[in-house]
Structure formats: C-alpha cells, structure tokens
Image: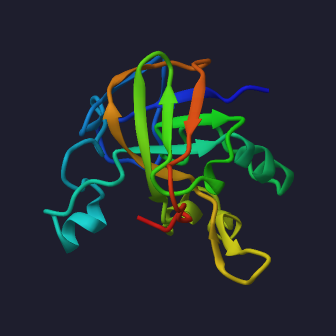
Amino acid sequence: MSARVTAVSGNATYSFSKPNRESVTLIAGFGVEGDVHAGEKVKHRFRMRRNPDQPNLRQVHLIHEELFDELAADGFTVAPGELGENITTRGVDLLGLPTGTLLRLGGSAVVEVTGLRNPCRQLDAFRAGLMKRLVGRDAKGAVAHKAGIMSVVLQGGEIRPGDPIEVVLPEGPRHPLRTV
C-alpha cells in the first residue's frame, strides 16, 4: 500500500478537535492557512506563556491513521481530526522517522519533521484513559509518545484526502524524534 493522506483538518479557534475539511492549504514558514496554530512564532497556548518568541516547530501536526486502529482494539473510538491533527496519514511509520525527514504531500507541499507531539491531559478529557494509551514505555523502558509528529512547512500547497506522501530521509547521521 502506498503512503497517502486520509484526512485533513483545521480550526481557526482553540479547541481540542479540528473539523475535517475537503482540503487545507499549507503556507511556507507559517503552517495551515486559517488554523489557530499557524504562525512563525509558537501558537500553543502553554508554550506561548513560557516564551512567546520561540519559533513555531509545531506548524503542522500529523497522525498515522493506524493509531486509530490500535486504539479501537483497546475500545477507544477516535476519528481523524479528533486528536487535533491537521493531516491524518496511512502507510507511513511517522513515529519511526528521524528528525529532519521531508514529507512531500500532494502535488507540491513539503513539510520537515521537527519532533514528536507531547501529549497533554486534554486527551483524558476527550476520552478517559486515552493519555495512558498514547504515552507508554517502549521495549527498552524509555518513554514512548504515540500522539503523532510535528512539522514545519518548507513549501506550500493544497492538500486533500487521497493525496500521495513521499518520504525523503535526511542525509548523514539520523536522529530519533524527541518531543517539541
């Protein structure tokens, strides 16, 4: 199966979930047009209180749809956009990508992977017990975050469900994702 976009979502106001759209437009150096988290500087409310001048490494949030399948097996019903992601994917091991990976989305957009989403307690307000499913331990005992990845837009373009995804791994040493 080829890697593809399965849903796109955005919201102009702060809320946990984001409604699905027919398309979203990515703007280079900014994020998803019309989304509350778009901008050159950080837009996450908690992070803005700590330092509003830090760069926005969280312009576009991506989640792998396979996560929803895994959660369904544990009794959690979650649909695209409900965890606040902008782009839902299938066929890409997002969590296994190294920092600096480029994702070519659709015909022209390119995002650079900056790190893992740091899950917050709003997950349990959305579905009780969900936080524990999205933050756990890997086989080596290290903390494992499963709530998707964050990226910045290098090249803009319109993204729609069904669009292909091409993964371009960085040259040289590869560094595992950390929370941003």
Give the side of residue 57 with respect to residue 5, left or right. Answer: left
Residue 102 pos. (x, y %): 47, 40
The N terminus, quarter of image: top right
* Relative depth, front residue between 160 and 175: 175
Badge count: 0
Extreme bottom residue here? Answer: 141
Residue 22 pos. (x, y %): 48, 16
Residue 178 pos. (x, y %): 50, 68
Which residue corresponds to the image point at 58% horizontal and 28% vertical from the top-left?
165
The C terminus, quarter of image: bottom left
Give the side of residue 41 with respect to residue 20, left or right. Answer: left
Give the side of residue 142 with respect to residue 34, left or right. Answer: right
Relative to 148, residue 119 above or below: below
Give the side of residue 147 with respect to residue 105, left or right. Answer: right
Relative to 104, residue 16 above or below: below
Which residue corresponds to the image point at 33% horizontal and 54% vertical from the top-left?
57
- The chosen color scheme is rainbow
Q: Quadrant of residue 10?
A: top left
Relative to 148, residue 180 above or below: below
Relative to 38, residue 163 above or below: above
Residue 104 pos. (x, y %): 49, 29
Extreme front residue here? Answer: 172
Extreme left residue here? Answer: 53
Which residue corresponds to the image point at 42% horizontal and 44% vertical from the top-left?
112
